[in-house]
Image (cartoon, rainbow, N blue to C red):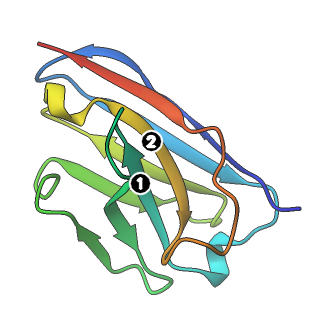
Amino acid sequence: QVQLVESGGGLVQAGGSLRLSCKDSGRIFSFNDMGWYRQAPGKQRELVATITIGGTTNYADTTEGRFTISRDGAWNVIYLQMDSLKPEDSAVYYCNTVPAGELPFGQGTQVIVSS
């Protein structure tokens, strides 16, 4: 079964940066549009960034201009560069296909932004 493994989260001050990574065990990135999702306590999971098979990127209004989604040349890793972080960015971040549902969500990686 394909597994998605996220890493790179942590505690950072407002205005700081983090880079998240997502690796898969089944080379699915080259066959699916992929995205980063996040879920804060008490809130629904939301899609914050998307990268298509063709390389086109899209962002939620709340992350446009601050987050950058990318992938490595070998299609092994999906990244999320997060700059100018805000306390409201605090959440557990997950990668998955877009739309979601093709694969189970992994454990995610927690991001905490202190004010």
Q: Residue furthest bottom?
A: 54
Quarter of the image where the N terminus is located: bottom right
- Image vertical order of residue 67 relative to residue 107, above or below: below
| 2 and 1 marks in contact (CB < 8 Å) | yes
Residue at mark 2: 93
Q: Which quadrant holds residue 112? A: top left
> Which picture quadrant has residue 7?
top right
Q: Which residue is mark 1?
A: 37
Query: Type of residue at label 2?
Result: Tyr
- Label 2 residue SS: strand
Measured as percent of width and height from the top left, residue 106 is found at 66, 46
Q: Quadrant of the C terminus?
A: top left
Q: Secondary structure at mark 1?
A: strand
Q: Residues within 10 Å of mark 1 (few under 14, many from 20)?
A: many
Marks 2 and 1 sit apart, C-alpha to C-alpha, by 6 Å
Residue 85 visible to the viewer = no
